[in-house]
Amino acid sequence: MILDQEKVERFRNMTLADPENELGFLSLGRALVDGKQFQQAIAPLMQALRLNAGLSIGYALLAEAQRQVGDSEGAINTLTRGYKVAQDRGDLMPRNQMADMLKELGAPLPEEKAVELTPELAAAGHIQCRRCGRVAPKMKERPFSGVFGEQIWQSICNPCFQLWIRQGTKVINELRLNLTEKSAQDVYDEHMKDFLNLK
């Protein structure tokens, strides 16, 4: 992917204006990784994780940047820490991504127990949450209309969706998103899909 200089500058200005904005640093690091500017991506991603050690996707992005600049040992350390964080938080997509990277680097994975959704539980209105992997009752109703609302209702548990509501407010405030603009809505949707493991 080609570096989106406008996006990089927007997020860089955001971090300069608010040095405590973990999502600004995370978004800057992601834009630099997407643009294959791996060395430049390391510092903002490390700062995002210093500000919030629970940003699972930050570990995956940082490890990718470290791996691309030849720091395999640093990448393994980052992935090992990040895998545990993602496992504890129920962030399956970053956890699986980090598991794949650990395997590619020849590093061991922590052991984990698989949880299965039985046909009986499915018939009783339970789902296996795509975000946390737990078997849980479906939300009482769809969170919103449309295909995406249906997808969330069929595959995300209520506790994870409530976590997103809080995180979504943080995304709007820290990234200063005006949701009447399509570009802001796209950024918001990308964060929601990442958070809920629906990509």
Image: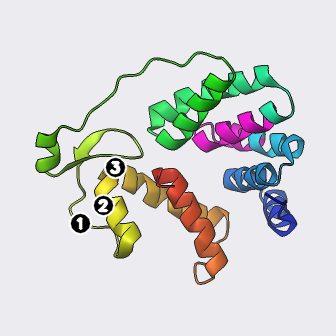
Q: Say whether marks 2 and 3 touch (CB < 8 Å).
A: no
Query: Would residue 125 appear left or right of 61 to someone viewing this image?
Result: left
Q: Earlier in the sequence, mark 2 or mark 1?
A: 1
Please give the label number shown on residue 153. Answer: 2
Give the residues in magenta. 47-66
Q: Distance between the residues labelled 1 and 3?
A: 14 Å
Task: Categorize mark 1 by other alpha carbons within 10 Å: few (<14), some (14-19), many (20+).
Answer: few
Q: Is mark 3 on a helix, strand or loop?
A: helix
For the point 56% across and 29% down, the residue is 99
Q: Which residue carries the number 3 mark?
A: 159
Q: Where is residue 45 in the image (x, y as percent from the top left)?
A: 75, 43
The answer to whether residue 172 is seen in the rendering is: no
Left or right side of 185 for 3:
right
Residue 141 vertical placement versus 179 (above, below): above
What's the CA distance linking mark 2 and mark 3?
12 Å
- Please tell me which residue lies in front, 11 or 96: 96
54 magenta-colored: yes
User: Do callouts 2 and 1 mark residues in contact (Cβ within 8 Å)?
Assistant: yes
